[in-house]
Image (cartoon, coloured by chain):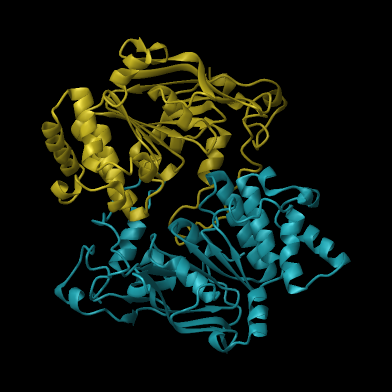
Amino acid sequence: MELLKVNNLKTCFFSRKGTAKAVDGVTYSLNSGEVLGIVGESGCGKSVTAQSIMGIVPNPPGMIVGGEILFDGQDLVKLSPKQMRLIRGNRIAMIFQEPMTSLNPVFTIGDQISEMFVLHRKYTQKQAMEASIDMLARVQIPSPHKRVHEFPHQLSGGMRQRAMIAMALSCDPEILIADEPTTALDVTVQAQILDLMIRLKEDFGTAVQVITHDMGVIAEMADRIVVMYAGRVLEEANTIEMFQNTLHPYTQGLLKSIPLLGSRTAGKYRKLTEIKGMIPSLYSLPEGCKFCDRCPHVMELCRKQEPQLFHADNGHSVRCWLHSGEK
Amino acid sequence: MNNGKPETKNEEKILKVENLKVHFPIRKGLLSRPVGYVYAVDGVSFDLKKGETLGIVGESGCGKTTAGMAVMNLNPPTDGDVWWKGKKMADMTPSQMRALRRDMQLIFQDPYSSLNPRMTVNQILADPMEVHGMYKGEKRKERIDYLMETVGLSPEQGTRYPHEFSGGQRQRIGIARSLALSPSLIIGDEPVSALDVSIQAQIINLLMNLKSEFDLSMIIISHDLAVVEYLCDRIIVMYLGKIIESASYASLYNDAKHPYTQALLSAVPVPDPLREKNRIILQGDVPSPIDPPSGCRFHTRCPRKMEICEKNEPAMKEFDKGHTAACHLY
C-alpha cells in the first residue's frame, strides 16, 4: 500500500549567487512496512527532500516551489503550519545525523521525550515521564530510570542516537525518516543502532525512509533504493535488482569506487575505479544529463537533452539515454 | 603495483616505537594540580620498515591519532622512546629535530580547516620550503608546478584560494603540501574520511600511486577498515590506548584472533544485499580512558570474557610470523 507519494517535488534555495534547485522534480513513493533507501553524495538533494516532507526547509532561503507530497489523502505542501504540526513528529517522525546538535542541551532526555506525549497524546507530565522511561527501555538504554533525568552531554554518542530514536518512535509514527542515522558513530556502535532500527521497525510496523551515502548501510537495511544526483532521481529499483543489475553509469561508478572489506585479502585486488571529475555545483549544472561531464559512456545526445526516467523490467527505472529503448 | 603481497624491498626499519605512553593530566583547582590522567596511549610498540604502509585502526578515543602525533613529537610522549633512522628522538638537538620534521609530513582529515583560507595555493605550497630554506629562487616555482601536476591539479590553479576548490581538490592540495619537502614518511590522519564516496576512490588511488612513485613509507590512521585494507601492508588494531592485535593485512582479515578485531570486522556494513550476515554485536560503548578497566581493557564488552580477563592483562603472543595479539583465549 502506498503510504507517501512525493510527486514532481521542486525545492529551491534563493541566494545572492542565484537559484539553487536542490530538489528538481523528484518523484517516488514509500509503501507501508518497507524500508526505502535514498543514496547520494553531498549536494544531491537527499536531505532537502526529507526536510520538504517534514516541512522544515529553512525559509528563507529555501522554498518548495512545485510538486506535491501526498500523505493520507492530503498534500503536505499545502497544509497550514498548524495542520502540519499535528503530523510532524506524530505521524511522520525524523532522526537526524548528529544526535548532539539535534538534542536540546539544556533539557533532560526525559523532558524532551515526554514533550512528544504531552503535545500529541495529551498525557499529564507524570504519565509522559513514565511513557518516556518505557521508550528508553525499548531502545535498550541501560537503567532508563536514571538516564531519563540526565542531560544529552552525559550520554555517549550511541546512547544519544538511541534517545533520538526513542523520541521519534514515541508517538508510534506511520513513517520514520532517518537522515544519515549512523554516520557520526563508530562501527561497533553503528552495528548496534542498525540492528536496533531493524528490530524496532518490525515491532512498530513503521515504514522507514533511510537517507545515507553509505552503500553498505543501504544494502543491509533497504528493501528498495532510490539513487539521487544533483536534485534528481537517477535510478530506482529493489535492493537486490539494484546491486545485481545496476543500470545507471553513476550507480555503477559509485559501487566500483568503494573499497570492499576483505576483497584485497581474497585476491580480488583491483585499483579502485574512480568517477572522474567532481560533483557539479548546483549553481552551474550542465545542460543535458547532469552526470554527463563525469560519465564514461557520454554521447552527444546526453549533453543536449536531459533523459527522462525510463522504465525497465522488474520495476527498475533509470534516467539514462543508454536505456531509452526500455520504455 | 603490489598484487596482494607486502612490498618489503629491504628490511631497514626507519621508525621504531618502544613502549610509547602519552598521558594527559586533568587539572583542577586553584593550583591546577593534576587530579587524574587520560591514558590516551598507554604502552604502544611498533616499527615501520622502509617503503611499508602501516595502518592504525580503532574507534574514536582509542588513541590512534595521539599515537601518530607522538611519533612526530607533536605531543611529546610521557614515556617510551621513538627511534627515527636509528636515532633516539628524545636525544636529538633542535637542529636535528628540524631535519626530522622535514622528513616526516602529515596529511590531515579535514581539507577545509587544514588550509589557510588567506593564502593562495602557491603560497600554501611555498610555505614549507620557505620555513626550511629549500628550493630557492627559480626552483621554487618549478617545484610548486611539479607538485600540482603530481597530485592531479593544473599549475594555473595555483593563484586561487582554497575556497575556490572542492573537498577532493583541497585534499589534493594538502597532499601536495605534505610532499613539498620530499619526505620519507607520510602520516595520514583519516585522509579520506571527510570526502564523498566517488572522491574517496580518487584520493586512495592517488596515495597508492604516490607511494610507489616516491618510495614513501606511510602510516595511515583510520577508523575505516576497508580503506586500511586497501592501502596498508600491515595493520595495528588499537583499543583504549593499547595495541590488541597486529598483523599483515591478509592474516588480519582472514584470521583475526582478538574478539575485538573479529567484532570490528563483522560490524562493517558490506554493499552486497545477498551476503549472509553473521554479525557480532558488541554491547555498550568504549569505556573512558581516564579510568580504563582492569585486566584486559576489552573485558567489559567482550563476548568471550573469562574470569582471568578481569584480573590479568594479557601479554602479546605471536601466532604466525608477524601476527601478534593480546588475548587470554590463546
From this view, report whether residue A284 is shown above or below residue B204.
above
**Could you tell whether A100 is left or right of A258 in the image?**
left
Residue located 61% across and 51% down the image: B202
Residue that lies at the very extreme toward the right in this rendered image: B138
Residue located 30% across and 64% down the image: B288
Tally the marks. Answer: 0
Q: Using the rendered view, name the quadrant where residue A37 is placed.
A: top left
Q: Using the rendered view, name the quadrant where residue B31 is placed.
A: bottom left
| Residue B329 place in picture, x, y as percent | 23, 74
Q: Foreground: A298 or A46?
A: A46
Residue B150 appears in view: no
| Residue B176 place in picture, x, y as percent | 69, 60
Residue A283 appears in view: yes
Instruction: Identify the chain drawn in cyan.
Output: B
Residue that lies at the very extreme toward the front in this rendered image: B30
**Could you tell whether B234 is left or right of A273 in the image?**
left
**Could you tell whether B162 is left or right of B292 in the image?**
right
Q: Foreground: A230 or B273?
A: A230
Q: Foreground: A268 or A120?
A: A120
From this view, report whether residue A58 is shown above or below residue A190.
above
For the N terminus of chain A, which image quadrant?
top left
| Residue B197 place in picture, x, y as percent | 53, 45
| Residue A208 place in picture, x, y as percent | 32, 31
From this view, report whether residue B115 is shown above or below residue B309.
above
From this view, report whether residue A293 is shown above or below residue B18.
above
Q: Foreground: A201 or A162?
A: A162
Residue located 63% across and 71% down the image: B216
Q: Colour of chain A?
A: yellow
